[in-house]
Image (cartoon, rainbow, N blue to C red):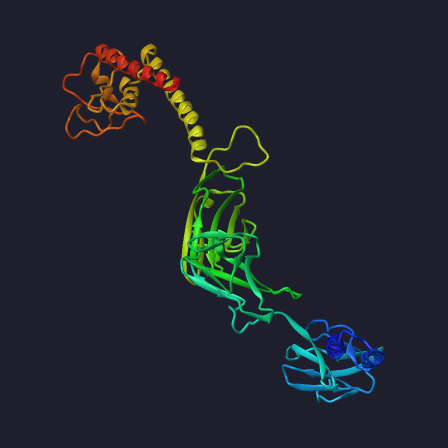
Amino acid sequence: MFIITVIKLLLIALNIFPSRFTNRRIMFLIYMTNLVTHVMMDEPRFAQPIPNVTVAVGRDANLPCVVEHLGGYKVAWIHIDRQMILTIHRHVISRIPRYSITYTDNTWLLHVNQAHQDDRGYYMCQVNTNPMISQVGYLQVVVPPNILDIESTPSSVAVRENQNINMTCRADGFPTPKIIWRREDGEEIAVEKKKKVLVYDGDVLPLTKVSRNEMGAYLCIATNGVPPSVSKRIILDVEFSPMIWVPNQLVGAPAGTDVTIDCHTEAHPKAIIYWVYNSVMVLPSKKYKTDYTENSYRAHMKLTIRNLQYGDFGNYRCISKNSLGETEGSIRVYEIPLPSTPSKQVTHTTVESRESNIIPALRNDTTKSLQTDVYAMKNDLYTGSGSSLAASGSSSAASSSSSSSSMQTSLLPGGAAGNSLSALSGGATAGGPGSKGSLAIGKSMFYTERPPNEYASAAAGLLHRLSWLLAGLILAAL
C-alpha cells in the first residue's frame, strides 16, 4: 500500500515537471521525496501475515498480529463468522471469557482457550488508520471421531442362520470420519454375494444368508486423521438348532477295562448336553467320568466307563437341546474277548477287530468238534461193548440237515434184538404199542419190524461221518 502511494507521488512529480529542470523545480521534487519518506516511516504497517492455525477441540490456540509503526493507532480483533468484535487494543470486548489479548514486541496475540467448534472460522486483525488496514487468518478446530451409539447397531445382535442382516456404525467428528469394518479374529468378511474381504468400507455392513461360521466379534473403526481413532465391538450371534456328530457309533471293549466314547455337537444359543443310559441320565461317579469341552458354538462330549461289567454293555445316547430344538446321537458299547498279549491300557476296537477275534474262535471250536467226532468213531469201530451206534450216529445226524429222516436201530453184540428190550421195565411186550421203558442218559431207541443188517448200517454211518470229517478239516484249514 505504501509502495503504491510512493509510485503515485512520483508520477505526479513527473507530470508536473517538464523535461527542463530549474532550481526551483528541483527543490520541489526534493521536498516531495522527503514528505513521502516521512509518511512511510510514520504510517503503521503489518510486518507479516496471520498464519492459519489448526487446533483440536478443547485445546488452546494463539493468533499473532505483528504491526510496525503503530504510533497512536489501535489494533482490534474481529471474528468474521460471528461478526463479533473480540478486542480493541488491550481491552477484551467479547463477553466470552475464553478470549484474551497480550502485546509484546509489536505483536498483538489473541488467545483462544479451550477452543470450541464455534470458534472455527476467519479472524481479522484491524488497524484504525484512514483508510483502515487489516489482514485475515483462519482458525481450524478439528474434532476426533466419536461413534454414535444411538444411531449404530447394539453391541450384541442375534440373527437366525441363513437370514440377512445389516450392521450399522455412525460417527461424527471434523473432518467427517471414515468407517471401516473388520473381524476381530482376522477372518475374512463375506459380503456382496459371498465376496470375501479383510476390510470393508462404509457405514453399513451388509451380510446375506449368514452362516454359523460368520458368528463372532466385528470391529467398526472410525478415523479422520485426528487422534485418537475409535472403534466399537459388535458381537454377531447366529442362532440354530443343535446338531450332533458321532465319530464311532460302535465301540467294543473287553470286560473289566475302561472305555471312552465321545460326541461332537454344535448349537446356539448354548445347548444343554448330557449322556443317557437305559433311560437314565448319566452323572459323574466312580463308575462314570464326564468331560465337556466348549469352544464358541462347538462342544465335545466325552464319557469314560470304568471297569466294564455285563450290565454296562448297551446303547448310550448323547443329547443336546436348546431353545430352538433337540437332537441326540447313539453309541453301542459291546464286549470283545480280552487280547492274549498283555497291555497297559485296552482301548475300544472297531468292527474289523471284532471279526479278526471271532474267526480264530470259530476255527478252535470246529477243531474241538472234529476231535470229538473222531473219538466217537473209534469207539464205534473198535470196542465190543454194548454202546449203540445210533448214539454216535445221532450226533452226526444233528450236524447234517440231509440225514434228518434216518432211522436209528440199537445194535447189541450177538445180533439179538431181543436183548435190547431187557432194559425195559414193567414187563411190557417188545414193540407193543403201549410199552414204556427207560434208557440210559444220552441214548435214544426207535423200533422197527425188520431191522437192517447191522454191518451194512455201520458201514453207511462210517462213510457219512468220514465225509463230514473231511469237510470239517477243509473248513479248519481255511
Relative to 354, is 51 above or below? below
Q: Quadrant of residue 84?
A: bottom right
Residue 220 falls left or right of residue 122: left
Relative to 150, is 255 above or below? above
Relative to 72, is 265 above or below? above
Residue 374 falls left or right of residue 269: left
The picture places residue 193, in percent across and down from the top left corner, at: 42, 54
Quadrant placement of the N terminus: bottom right
The picture places residue 475, in percent across and down from the top left corner, at: 36, 19
Viewer-proximal residue among 250 and 308: 250
- x 78%, y 82%: residue: 101
Quadrant placement of the C terminus: top left
- x 54%, y 36%: residue: 346
Q: Quadrant of residue 120?
A: bottom right
Counting the numbered discs, the total is 0
Viewer-proximal residue among 381 and 215: 215
The picture places residue 172, in percent across and down from the top left corner, at: 58, 71
Viewer-proximal residue among 19 and 285: 19
The picture places residue 43, in percent across and down from the top left corner, at: 80, 81
Q: Is residue 163 visible?
A: yes
- x 71%, y 84%: residue: 132
Residue 286 falls left or right of residue 265: right
